[in-house]
Structures are given as C-alpha cells and as structure tokens.
Image (tube, rainbow, N blue to C red):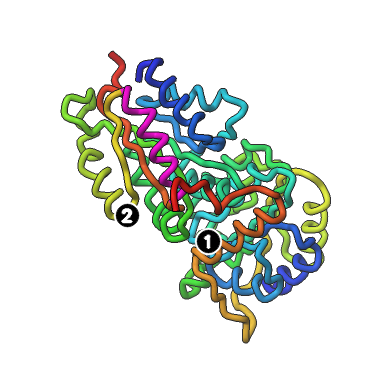
C-alpha cells in the first residue's frame, strides 16, 4: 500500500469518528495500521487473533466507543466465530476493514487465491453487508458510508480494500 | 470449593456499578441468580468474554470490570491474556471458575484437568497479578484485594462441577442483553450508544 493511500484510509476513519481500532498486522495495510497505532486519539488494541479483535470491538462499542477492526482477508476466517456469535447475533455494530487481494491483476501469490474464494461467500453467509474500494478515490466515501450504515443498522459492515488501493507500485 | 459459594461471596463485595461480563454456561445462570443487573453482560459465547471485557475496560477505564470466565472458555482464546496484559488495564478482575471440565457441554474434562495451568499461562502472558485459590477463604481474600486496588488481576478459582437447584432461567437473548447493557452504560456514563443520528425518518 502506498503511503498516500494509507493516508486516505486513515483520514476516512478519522472523519468517520472511529476512535477504537483492533487490528492484526498485515503487510498489505500495514502503513494505515501504523498511522492508527501512532495516533493517541484512537484507542488501539493489537490483537493476536481476529476473533478476539471482534470481541474487543464489541466490548468497546458497549462502552461507548466507535470501533473498527482492521484485518487481512485470511484473518476473516479466524474472525468468523466472533462475528457470527457476537457481532451478528447481538447486533453489535463495527466497521470491518479487510485487505483483500482478490482482484485479477493483484500482486498476490498462490496462497491468496484461497481468500479470493472464501472472502465474499463468508461475508454473504454471515449476513454481513460489504462494499469494495479498489480505487483510491473511492476509499473515503466507501469507508464513511460503511461506517454510517454499520452504526445505523447496528450490524457489522465490511469494506474490502483491493486492487489499486493495496498496490505498492 | 463450590462455584456458587465463590460467586455469592463476590456478589456481596461488588458495588452496583461494577460491570460484569460472563461466559455462556452455568456461571451466567448462577451469577444472574445472585446479582441480577443491567450492569451484567451474560452468556457470551465460548472464547469471547475475556476480550469483550478488554474492550469495555479500555473504553471505560474508570469503571470496575469483572470478567467471569470458564476454563474451557478461556482455553479457546488464550491469546486474549497476552493482549489484555499489554493494555495495562486499570480496573479489571479476571476470574476463571476452573472446574476442569466443559460442564455446560456435558462435563467432559478440559485441558486444566490434565497439565494446563491457566495461572502460569496468564503470568507468562504478562498479566501482573495472577494466582490460584482453592478454598473459599482464599477466594474471598484475593477477590477483595483485587477489587480494592487498581490494576489487572487474574485469579483461577478451582471449583467442583455442579450447580444449585432452581436457578432462575435466563430470559434475555443477545439483542435484548445488548440493549439493556448499552442503555445502562448510556445512563451511567452520559454517552450515546444506541441512538445514532438518523438521516431521515
């Protein structure tokens, strides 16, 4: 991810009022995660398991915060237990930002075709609405819209960052 | 040591504003019988309740948070211990009622019936205060100490399997539990959680 795209994602989260972030480091979205972790106005919880990140976001929302979970598409598989058992079943809102190397032309090796197959079907199965931002100029509106819907619906909403947004060059 | 007796002692020590998060199974039913309150968030599913407590504790660092966990429950997500330790929680008491079994799931043995030592794992994960108690007197002493002093406390209470008769049935589903808990936080903290701005009617 280019620094200028990381800045767009970071600014969109700030503008959306996100003040709590749980994240598991991922190289595709590392620069945005780093900016968030260094922002003292955002409470950040570095998690070692994405389902735990969902739970921390749920607790944070119940405590009055506006949470986002920032993970990789591979981590979505780990997050599904918490998303299904807590966020969806209780109706606890959270913005779920997913770095998704799922587009033809993405610089992703053999490992990532698995997540091309799993990511969108999992979100559909969990009944988590999602929206994609592939172009940097889309990212701000997509993130703010997803955040608004998550908190109005009291339901998790995911943003799939992919394509040019994640590319380094 | 009976779990119900430990929880009864705990219920007599906490004030009405103490937030309690408990995992699914008999712990939630017993706690609800002893301390029914909208400051409780009960029946959180397997492996998730410690991290829910973490999220609440970092969002409301001035509030006392008690996490009532089970051994099987915590074993599913031991990573929570490491991440909680790194947050330097200010008023969190994490109690594992360790009956060495999946009691709510039929009673087969958990890993703590074998070689796993959750107190040692918590200490190794960086939780500053971690102990094991085996008698009601020890439980009461340690629980009281951890509630009086600021910080992050972890306690494994070794308890027998088995609950008590005629506990009230838990009637809340997840959504009602959410509404009641969130409304309670709104009223005691003066924050807006459930009433986001609507763009139209």
Quarter of the image for the C terminus of chain A: give it: top left
Q: Which of B1/B200 is in front?
A: B200
Q: Say which residue label 2 marks.
A: A127
Q: What element carries label 2?
A: loop
Residue B10 in magenta stretch = no
The residue at the far left in this view is: A104
Say left or right for B30 vs A74: right
From what the image shows, is residue A19 above or below residue A93? above
Say left or right for B82 vs A53: right
Q: Say which residue label 1 marks.
A: B44
Looking at the picture, how far across and down is residue B174, in whole percent? 50, 64
Q: Which chain carries label 2?
A: A
Q: Tell how many labels.
A: 2
Q: Mark 1 lies on which chain?
A: B
The residue at the far front in this view is: B201
Residue A140 in magenta stretch = yes
Tell me the quarter of the picture where residue B147 sits.
bottom right
Residue range highlighted in magenta: A136-152
Say left or right for B183 vs B5: left
Looking at the picture, how far across and down is residue A11, in whole percent? 47, 24
Residue at 71% in and 70% down: B35
Quarter of the image for the N terminus of chain A: give it: top left
The overriding secondary structure of the stretch rendered in magenta is: helix
């Amino acid at each position: 991810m280019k620094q200028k795209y990381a800045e767009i994602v970071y600014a969109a989260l700030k503008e959306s009022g996100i003040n709590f972030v749980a994240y598991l480091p991922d190289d595709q979205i590392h620069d945005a995660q780093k900016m968030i972790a260094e922002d003292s106005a955002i409470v950040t919880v570095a998690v070692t398991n994405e389902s735990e990140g969902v739970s921390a976001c749920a607790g944070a929302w119940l405590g009055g915060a506006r949470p986002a979970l920032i993970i990789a598409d591979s981590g979505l598989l780990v997050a599904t237990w918490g998303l299904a058992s807590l966020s969806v079943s209780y109706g606890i809102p959270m913005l779920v930002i997913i770095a998704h190397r799922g587009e033809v032309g993405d610089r992703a090796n053999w490992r990532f075709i698995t997540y091309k197959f799993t990511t969108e079907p999992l979100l559909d199965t969990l009944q988590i609405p999602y929206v994609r931002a592939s172009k940097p100029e889309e990212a701000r509106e997509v993130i703010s819209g997803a955040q608004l819907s998550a908190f109005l619906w009291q339901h998790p909403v995911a943003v799939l960052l992919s394509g040019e947004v994640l590319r380094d060059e | 040591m009976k779990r119900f007796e430990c929880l009864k002692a705990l219920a007599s020590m906490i004030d009405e504003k103490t937030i309690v998060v408990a995992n699914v199974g008999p712990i939630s039913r017993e706690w609800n019988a002893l301390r029914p309150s909208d400051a409780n968030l009960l029946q959180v599913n397997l492996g998730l309740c410690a991290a829910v407590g973490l999220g609440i504790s970092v969002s409301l660092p001035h509030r006392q948070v008690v996490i009532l966990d089970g051994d099987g429950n915590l074993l599913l997500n031991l990573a929570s211990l490491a991440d909680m330790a790194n947050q330097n929680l200010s008023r969190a008491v994490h109690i594992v009622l360790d009956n060495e079994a999946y009691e709510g799931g039929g009673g087969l043995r958990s890993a703590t019936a074998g070689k796993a030592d959750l107190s040692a794992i918590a200490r190794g994960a960086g939780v500053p205060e971690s102990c094991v108690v085996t008698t009601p007197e020890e439980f009461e002493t340690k629980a009281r100490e951890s509630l009086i002093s600021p910080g992050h406390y972890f306690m494994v209470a070794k308890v027998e399997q088995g609950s008590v008769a005629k506990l009230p049935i838990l009637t809340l589903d997840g959504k009602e539990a959410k509404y009641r808990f969130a409304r309670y936080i709104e009223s005691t903290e003066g924050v807006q959680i459930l009433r986001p701005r609507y763009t139209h009617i």
